[in-house]
Image: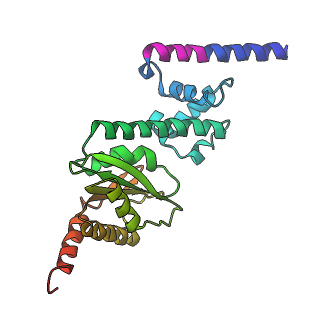
Amino acid sequence: MLREMASDKFNDNRKHRERLRARFEHGGLSSLADHEIVELLLTLGFPRRDCKPQAHEAIRRFKNLKGVLEAPSEELARIEGLGERSTIALRLIRDVSQRLIRDRTIDTGISYSSAEDVFDYLKISIASRPREVFKVLYLNNRNQLIEEKTLFEGTVNRSAVYPREVMQDALREHASALIFAHNHPSGCLEPSPEDKNLTRTLVFAAIFMQLKVLDHLIITQDGYYSFAEHGLVERWESEYIKLNMPGS
């Protein structure tokens, strides 16, 4: 009897997954609710398991599909029944999506015209990281992305960014402009004294190498802080000019 019940449950789960896949094949993502999309993604890690309870719980905790995909792996792992394979599947989908956006941005030559553009581009990839990640966007003279590099990934309270390495990469990529971005896992958007000192140093180094720093963004789940919008990049550019004027 128990074996028959288990067999019936397995068949029901299999038919349910087949119905979801058929709906996706014929109607795409728009034919599925958020929890159904999450359920399909989870079956990549557990193709024979009923993932519906975990999908519903993930949506309950993180509100929607976007929230689930941006959630830290540590938070996802707290959902009962979600193992490492499931969280890796969700991270893989998120990171592949970000890679696709990056490659398409490079191929189509989209120009960055505001801090919000950079925030929209990078939020998924770094906002929810549990540790600080420092990225550099290398741009041409039309502010189009040439290359993106993760320069450092470390602990929450420490970072190690070497201006010489940044400038060497800029020259190698034939870049004309740079945008820096890093996340604050604490959620605080205010730049630390170390953030300001580093950015000032990078602005000075870029001017010396005849490059332009367009901005430095601090990114969290709730928004961003733009050094350029707060006038800091322009202030340090003026400071560099004054320091290097004859007789100063």
Q: Specify the quadrant of the image occupied by residue 86.
A: top right
Residue 217 appears in the rendering: no
User: Which of these two is toward me, 210 or 160?
Assistant: 210
Residue extending furthest toward the right: 1
Colouring rule applied to residues = rainbow
Residue 81 appears in the rendering: yes
x, y (%) of residue 99? 43, 39
Report the residue at 56% width, 13% height from top: 19
Vertical position of residue 20 compared to residue 201: above or below = above
Vertical position of residue 194 compared to residue 27: above or below = below
Q: Is residue 180 magenta?
A: no
Vertical position of residue 75 compared to residue 156: above or below = above
x, y (%) of residue 237? 21, 69
The number of discs equals 0
Residue extending furthest toward the left: 246
Q: Where does the N terminus fall, quadrant-wise?
A: top right
Q: Where does the C terminus fall, quadrant-wise?
A: bottom left
Left or right: 78 with respect to 90?
A: right
Report the residue at 48% width, 18% height from top: 24
x, y (%) of residue 246? 14, 83
User: Which of these two is toward me, 146 or 40?
Assistant: 146
From which residue to which does the magenta span run?
17-27
Report the residue at 37% width, 65% height from top: 191
Magenta stretch, overall SS:
helix
Left or right: 119 with respect to 97?
A: left
